[in-house]
Image (cartoon, grey):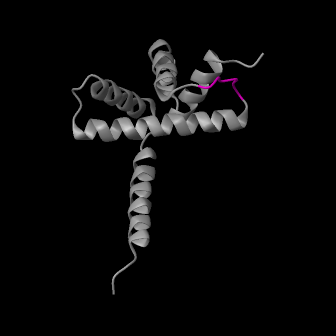
Amino acid sequence: MRLPRSFTSLLGVLGITMCVAAKAQELTDARRLARGLGAIEAVAGGKGTMADRLDAAYTTGYITASLDAVLSLRVACVPNLSPIQQIDVVRSHLASNRDAWTEPAFQIILQAYRNRFPCN
């Protein structure tokens, strides 16, 4: 019995989604977040490996999803940002706040947006 093409496509998408979700869960601390930011820089500079491309994609997705949570929690007044701008907010916060390296990744991202875009 042959499965319909739409069903096999759905299975493929679900498989990819599960892999991405599992990889994104690894982004739990500052070191892993910094490694992902480094992978983004390597890929942007044309020097990234396949592993760097995957880390860059997962990190970008994690930052974007975290911004969605920040917006839904209404803890910062963030304007519409491109993914590159989102990454720059997190990267600059992590670089200028060495004490943040002890925090969980989501807390770092939350604080980065709170500091950059406070609600008055």
- From the viewer's side, name the closer residue of 57 and 27: 57
Q: Residue furthest top?
A: 96
Q: Quadrant of residue 18?
A: bottom left
The main secondary structure of the magenta stretch is: loop
Residue 27 visible in the displayed image: yes
First to last magenta residue range:
75-80
Residue located at (50% from left, 22% from top) = 85
Q: Quadrant of residue 42?
A: top left
Confirm whether the magenta stretch covers residue 77. Answer: yes
Q: Is 102 left or right of 2, judged from the image as shown?
A: right
Confirm whether the magenta stretch covers residue 79. Answer: yes
Q: Is 28 left or right of 115, judged from the image as shown?
A: left
Residue located at (44% from left, 29% from top) = 30
Residue located at (33% from left, 82% from top) = 2
Image quadrant for the N terminus? Answer: bottom left
Where residue 62 sits: x, y (%)? Answer: 49, 39
Q: Is residue 24 above or below residue 1?
A: above
Q: Residue furthest front?
A: 5
Residue 28 visible in the displayed image: no
- From the viewer's side, name the closer residue of 68 and 25: 68
Q: Residue furthest right?
A: 120
Image quadrant for the C terminus? Answer: top right
Q: How many marks?
A: 0
Where residue 25 sits: x, y (%)? Answer: 46, 47
Residue located at (47% from left, 20% from top) = 88
Where residue 102 sits: x, y (%)? Answer: 49, 27
